Amino acid sequence: MANSEPLLPGGGRKAKHTKASMLYGADEYLELLAKKYEEFDELATLLQAAPDAAHVDNDAAKSAARKDGGGAMLQLDVDDNKRSKRTQRAIPTPNIPDPMPPELAFLFAKITPEQKMYMWNIYTLIFVAECLTVVLYWAMMRYGEALGVSFSMATTIYGFIMVPLCIQNIYILHDVVHGATFPPYEWQNYITHPLADFFSLPWMDVIMEHNRHHNSTFDLLNHGEFGWDPANWLYTLQEW
């Protein structure tokens, strides 16, 4: 049976976050999210335009979203009948079972603040592990010869550890983009892409680009169905 309890157990009196504290509690994190949505109201507007907007931080995001819609860049490109101008398809809606089977309820449950913090903790752990793996590779190259560790062996060990870490990095990066957009601590904004590519993008640029992509392209066979998709250039050869 699905367990609706948060990944991090609560219980007891919650500690109040102070300037001297190193850790956020769930209540303080909720306050941070509300402030972030007010600061980045364009993102709040994008999230509210998504078909699964009800599963986002609806209260904070809805109140921060622009009442005027924010212009074409933040809206779905539809006609007067709320259909795609390109395919005439109606805006897709989530196919939520009704009544909800108990064993599927967790798939449609909103992510709790504790779970958001847990996701960022795991992502941070993976980033630290990647950095330590680089240090390990250097150590094997520097001191390995005296211990009988050849270049090929060192590289094999490094790749065996680093490849799955990088794969998990991408998976969890995508999870936090959608489920835990804002990290609990500002410095976590800077650990998302140093090991992902030769060029790094600011975290907010990645969030805005990716959410605009999902709002424009619900079906990967129809890119840009509901407006401009910033990821179109990735699929040019596929659709050529």
Image: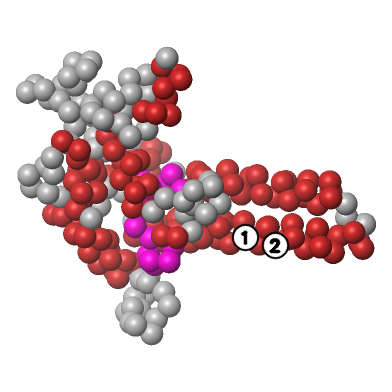
Q: Residue furthest front?
A: 199
Task: Find numbered disc 2 in the image and state the secondary structure of the residue it sits on.
Answer: helix
Query: What residue sits 77% from the left and 63% below the top?
Result: 139
Task: Find numbered disc 1 in the image and state the secondary structure of the residue it sits on.
Answer: helix
| Kind of residue indicated by mark 1 | Cys
Instruction: Locate residue 167 relative to residue 67 in the image: left or right.
Output: right
Membership of 186 in magenta stretch: yes
How far apart marks 2 and 1 lie (CA) works out to 6 Å
Q: Residue furthest bottom?
A: 20
Dominant secondary-structure state across the stretch colored magenta: helix
Figure colour scheme: secondary structure
Query: Marks 2 and 1: CB-CB under 8 Å?
Result: yes
Query: Label 1 belongs to which residue?
Result: 131
Residue range highlighted in magenta: 173-188
Query: What residue sits 42% from the left and 46% below the top?
Result: 175
Query: What residue sits 38% from the left and 85% below the top?
Result: 20
Is residue 105 at all visible to an observer of this figure? no
Percent x, y for residue 209? 33, 42
Residue 75 vertical position relative to residue 60 in the rendered view, above or below: above
Question: Which picture quadrant has residue 26?
Answer: bottom left
Query: Label 2 belongs to which residue?
Result: 135
Percent x, y for residue 71? 13, 40
66 or 28: nearer the eye?
66
